[in-house]
Amino acid sequence: ELLLLNPSITDPDKIKAGDILLIPGTHGVSLDQISKNGLFKLLSDLLWPGSSGPGTSDAYQNSHYDPIVIDLNGDGVKTISKSAGLVFDHDGNLFAENTGWVSPEDGLLVLDKNHDGKIGSGNELFGSNTILNNGQKAQNGYEALREYDENHDGVIDKNDTIWSQLKVWQDKNSNATVDDGELFTLEQLKIAGIKLNYKNINNTDSEGNTHLQQGGVIYEDGHTGMAEDIGLDTDKGKTQYVGDTTVSEDVLALPYIRGFGNVADLQVAMSHNDALKALVSQYVAADEAGKSRLVEQIIYAWTGTTDTDPHGRGNYIDARHLAVLEVTTGEKYHNLMNSANPNPNDGPILEKEYQKFYGYVDAMLQAQTTYKDIFSKINVTLDKDCRDFTLNFQDMEKYISGMSNQSDALNLRGLLFSLLVYMPQFEDVSNSAGIPAVRDNTGDDIYQGGNNHPDYYFFEKGHGQDVIQDYAGNDDQADTVVFRQALSDGATFDHVGDDLVIHAYGDDNSVTLKNYFNSDGYRRYHLVFDDATLNAEQVLAREYTFTGTDG
């Protein structure tokens, strides 16, 4: 039974496990059993495309693609924001990008090159992804169309062979897919010619799409209308794989992780990559130490970066890590000097983003294997109007709070934190999961915690030089600082004035706990490493390098 999530659904009792819910603007998702990874598909897919994936605004900029759009109703060319969640395979690589789109009142000029009655990619539009006769991509839609002007009169009309093959796609239901009754011949629209001369206007509208060039069309009665080359705002990191998504039963039993950029969902990728499937199968069967060793191998195999030379992109980042970010964002890195090698400023930023992605993959794998029974306690419910899903962490939080091993409990909170980190409602969701948390992912920061509840701070390699200003009035309000993938024996602790400075990942990364040596309230922290959890008594018993302050 297919159900559309919209106000027309009035009877939530109709919905049962196994039904397919068609969510406008996103994927169809199945309310299947947890044993089939249904929970993790919901966590990964349900809130897309609002979710943010790997990448950093410091290194990447969103792209645009620019088809020719004809103003069909005479009120100017109107567009739809990419926030509507539409996807279209602009570059023909089988990954449909989250994109801005055209108003249903206007139409895209198209050429159905393979005569299948569909417009499957940007190569069948007229824009910057049109392949010219010389094998190069066109600069814009008008230059793409100019190749068909056989008599060089500056107009495409019935005197040009291409004329009878051109159509206008009016996407009446705004789903970025050709449906019945949406493709029109130019004669049906009474268009007699398309002018190739244009002017540059470069105007970004309120929907975030840029009107780049403006030209015109000639109607049979002699009046002229408007046509524009529209730069549709596009995010190459938020994609939907539109190739073969067949997944065998044995692969369905393995972990699921949503793909990003030019990377298909993990299960789909395993169906096409036996080496990746073997690695994930090894992971499922491995002990805790073995699982940890396999995570990065899985990431490299999944993203096709295994053979990348780690020293191939300069001195400031592991080239494999940068390659992973490039394929998961769909963008090639270049700095302001147009170099493909990160400079000393960008390198740490990019490395930090890679570590964030690593943590996400690690958490998704562990949540579906080692801690599967615990994470299955997350409940997903549909509201009475069948419009929204709610993630309920109450059962999971109750279980974690009752664990006798505090270190294991904190590790589970950290995994949950990493699992949710790409969700758009991340802060609200993490709070509902019992993790009023701060995760460093922006550089050198100062965090001011609350004084009446426990806070959680999560750090990973590459976090920078950070400062925490927090106070706990009693043990119940004690805060937690988690250093993911770090060992307490390898960390250094420095006494600087009244502050404690912790280096968990080397000299380039530090966390300063302000006023730690001032009074008990400033040192009520659980410092969590992979091998141990330290309280204030254990920290104070360590040997320190003491540094005074000026004045």
Image (cartoon, rainbow, N blue to C red):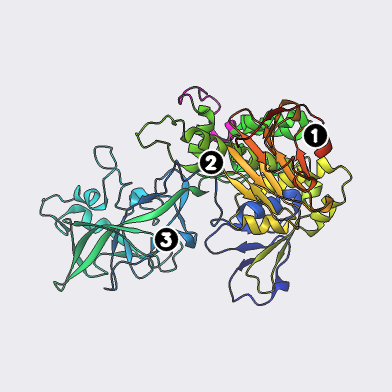
At x 56% / y 54%, what residue is drawn? Answer: 51
At x 23% / y 51%, what residue is drawn? Answer: 145
Above/below status of 152 relative to 157: above
Q: Earlier in the sequence, mark 2 or mark 1?
A: 2
Q: What SS does tag 1 mark?
A: helix
Numbered label tally: 3
Is 224 left, or right, of 520 in this rendering?
left
Q: CA distance from mark 3 to mark 2?
A: 25 Å
Magenta residue span: 300-315
Q: Please name the amino acid that badge 3 sits on.
A: Val
At x 42% / y 49%, what residue is drawn? Answer: 62
Q: Position of residue 469 (x, y in %)?
A: 66, 48
| Dot 2 and dot 1 residues touching (CB under 8 Å) | no
Q: What label does residue 178 carry, if any?
A: 3
Q: Position of residue 11 (x, y in %)?
A: 69, 76
Q: Position of residue 355 (x, y in %)?
A: 60, 37
| Dot 3 and dot 2 residues touching (CB under 8 Å) | no
Q: Earlier in the sequence, mark 1 or mark 3?
A: 3
Above/below status of 540 relative to 178: above
* Mark 2, residue position: 263
Q: What SS does tag 3 mark?
A: loop
Q: Please name the amino acid that badge 1 sits on.
A: Leu
* Mark 1, residue position: 540
Is 107 left, or right, of 173 in this rendering?
left
Q: Please name the amino acid that badge 2 sits on.
A: Val
